[in-house]
Amino acid sequence: MNTALWFVLAGALLTVMALARTTLSRLPLSSSQLYLMVGVGIGPLGIGLLVFDPIEQAKTLEVLTEIVVTLSLFAAGLKLRTPLSDGRWKLPLRLATVSMTLTVAGIAALGYWELGLPIGAAVLLGAVLAPTDPVLASDVQIENPDDTDRLRFSLTGEAGFNDGAAFPFVMLGLGLLGLHDLGEGWWRWWTVDLLWAVFGGLGIGAALGMAVGRLVVYLRRTHREAVGSDDFLALGLVALAYGLALMLSSYAFLAAFAAGLALRYEERRETGDEASDAVEAMAREGAEEEVAVKEHAAPAYMASAVLGFSEQLERIGAVALVVLVGALLHLAEWSFDALWFVPAVLLVVRPLSVWIGMAGSSTSGLQRELLAWFGVRGIGSVYYLMFAETHDLYDGFTERLLGLVLITIAASIVVHGVSVTPLMAWYSKRSRSEERKAVEAGGE
């Protein structure tokens, strides 16, 4: 297909999505579902315009997914304005540690005992499918930085933490397959792949986020400098955090997430508990740069402008990659194993892991049910599998794992996309009703 036709297709898709965005928000239909259908339509299952071999092009696909997931994690960190001392942080941490580990174990058990995979390949499959996706789960994440709803906050924080928290299990799976050095008695895995890589990534991202945030606010307030380049600031901070984390053998996804958290922390430290809605609005609408240097407005303007730019890039990347996933569905093996495996992951393993992880927490029964349901799988899973492929994953495992992962992602996009609008609307309505009842009861 010639270049001109590609431009026409891309332009038509983006224009239609821009015009239909408001309509889609009211329907049980997500933008990701439409991207997936476009991919199927132009791929080998459709008219055959997009033919892509993920095995031969594994490195390219790894880099593309890496970029989009990194930007999404940075944006997720910027959305979370709740202070670290708030008890709500325990919820995403539980999901990203206890529930994540149980999900990996549950999927690995299915892979080993029911699919007949070697233990290393089974653990790898669990690690690839365990993390929820920060790119495709935006509809269930917090709507603005001051949103403290437990459900949305937990899902946003989980998506931010667990895309990096899955990495130790990826390395464990590769190690059990003989493709990574775990060390005698797994000492290297425990000390380097788990402890150092996790906490090192978080520390590197947090330090850079705070340092850059303070420097920019200082320059704007004191010298009226460093104004008008928030897009460069976003890309620069993400690249610094990601690159330095990689150089120091820590998890760069966690560094990107922590950088976003730290930048938002600096904004909150400067502006206090209440964010200025007016400044947030002006920043998103490209208001006069004079706002960026005002004493009170500078931190909020910086954080909001960087978040807006990051979200735009994230959405553009999601279009391309979900279309690719749709085009790759011809590689999926629609066997009996796939027909039971995918429901088992989405309807059994994920819910059980969440309910165990949330036991004794402050979440309501309804919130736990929705947390259990909205375990969206997507771009992050593609990245992890391509990462394994570029680290010499055996070809015999690649095709089978790829098929299961693609089917799980497609199923997640469809079922979660159909349910997200009515379920979240119902949840919001019920939450407002409960808040009114609480206020009325308090006033009596």
Image (spheres, helix red, strand yellow):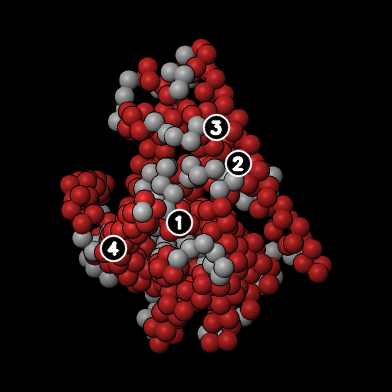
* First in sequence: mark 2 vs mark 3: 2
Viewer can see residue 199: yes
> Label 1 sits on what residue type?
Arg
Q: Which quarter of the image is occupied by the N terminus?
A: bottom left
Q: Position of residue 108 (x, y in %)?
A: 58, 77
* Viewer-proximal residue among 359 and 107: 359
Give the residue drawn at x 22%, y 50%.
Answer: 21
> Label 4 sits on what residue type?
Trp
* First in sequence: mark 4 vs mark 3: 3
Image disc number at residue 426: 4
Camera-side mark, 2 or 4: 4
- Separation of marks 4 and 1 at Cα, in angstroms: 15 Å
Q: Quadrant of residue 113?
A: bottom right
> Label 3 sits on what residue type?
Arg
Q: Quadrant of residue 346?
A: bottom left
Would you say 424 lies left or right of 110 here? left
Give the residue drawn at x 48%, y 63%.
Answer: 363
Image disc number at residue 150: 1
Give the residue drawn at x 27%, y 67%.
Answer: 418
- Separation of marks 2 and 4 at Cα, in angstroms: 37 Å
Q: Quadrant of residue 29?
A: bottom left
Image disc number at residue 368: none
- Separation of marks 2 and 1 at Cα, in angstroms: 25 Å
- Separation of marks 4 and 3 at Cα, in angstroms: 35 Å
Secondary structure under tag 2 reads helix
Camera-side mark, 2 or 3: 3
* First in sequence: mark 2 vs mark 4: 2
What residue is pinned by disc 3? 269
Secondary structure under tag 4 reads helix
CB within 8 Å, label 4 to label 1:
no
> Label 2 sits on what residue type?
Gly
